Amino acid sequence: MPEPPHLDSPIGPARTVEVADRVFAFLQPDGSWWINNTGFVVGSDGVLAIDASSTERRTRSFLAAISSVTGEKVRILVNTHHHGDHTNGNCLFDDALIVAHTKCREQVLGQSVGGFEQIFGPVEWGNLEISAPVLTFEERVDLHVDDVRVELDFAGGPAHTTGDVVAWLPDAGVLFAGDLVFDGGTPFVLMGSVAGSITALHRIRNFGARTIVPGHGGICGPDRIDSVEAYLRYVQTLALDGVAAGLSPLEAAREADLGSYAELTDPERIVGNLHRAYSEIEGLPLGGPIDVLNAFADMIAFNGGRPLRCLA
């Protein structure tokens, strides 16, 4: 197979890995803010792609990687959820049919490309416009790329968001987990639910995947599901202790001993996760609206008043 063109980065190049026959992961290090993984399945008359990327530059690099493997066009693009690092580049997939959960479509239509300078500093988003999914589903839909079945399942929850789906390839034992799973990075559930994420992890664990392509980080095995769940349970315990002590989410985060979790990228996400966990302790609906901008302001404060690290 010819070596695909790589996206140069101060944290290393993107790379394409064949995780099963005709099934590829496109990995973008280091998986921190706005730097996601994608994937694709190659068929005899077209390609199914899983997620776009955050910027024009990164999405075009993904498309170039696909072209280095096959001359077939992307016919179907799956969005695992609505966040811009997975959907901003949708518009570059020409006439591909974009498939996602119903709630993902609603949320994509309500967002814009960029506009986060106060949080992340300047980012070269490129020439992008919102392109929403056109085929939506509620619980499950099966897609076929020749003899490869790609099962799209609603993860339940709310989890990372309120509209997460995973792409499960049962014959290959490969799971594209979206942002339900992070490898080497701090999980983030501010726009979803801590408790709901744990439920979703139990659900995807039952697939019995041998290989997991997380939304961010390196290819991993099913043990990474356990690691993410352990972190989320730590967040719940920290939130209970913080509420009992009368601490705000930011104060609780500052007093916390993150232990090994401090070694994960983007550790300031603990503050956003605590904002969500506090809302659940207070009895607010899982995944319901909370003050996201205030949570990001607290994350910046936790980060020493600096914009959050973003190398998109």
Image (spheres, helix red, strand yellow):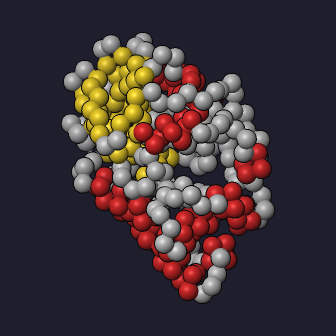
The quarter of the rendered structure image containing the C terminus is top right
Residue 26 in sight: no
Residue 297 located left or right of residue 171: right
Instruction: Please identify the quarter of the rendering in which residue 85 is found.
Output: top right
Q: Quadrant of residue 35?
A: top right
**Residue pictured at 54% horizontal, 41% vertical:** 107
**Whole-percent x and y of residue 246?**
63, 85
**What residue sits 60% from the left and 36% below the top?**
54
Residue 75 visible, this angle: yes
The reply, left or right, for residue 169 in relation to residue 302 is left
Above or below 255: residue 103: above
Q: Position of residue 33 (x, y in %)?
A: 61, 48
Tell how many labels: 0
Q: Which of 38 and 190 is in front in this view?
A: 190
Rendered-image quadrant of the N terminus:
top left
| Residue situated in front as seen by the camera: 303 or 261 | 303
Q: Where is residue 22 in the image (x, y as percent from the top left)?
A: 32, 26
Residue 43 at x, y = what percent? 31, 19
Q: Pick the residue in front: 36 or 86.
A: 86
Which residue is farthest bottom?
Answer: 245
Residue 18 quadrant: top left
Residue at 65 percent of width and 36 percent of height:
112
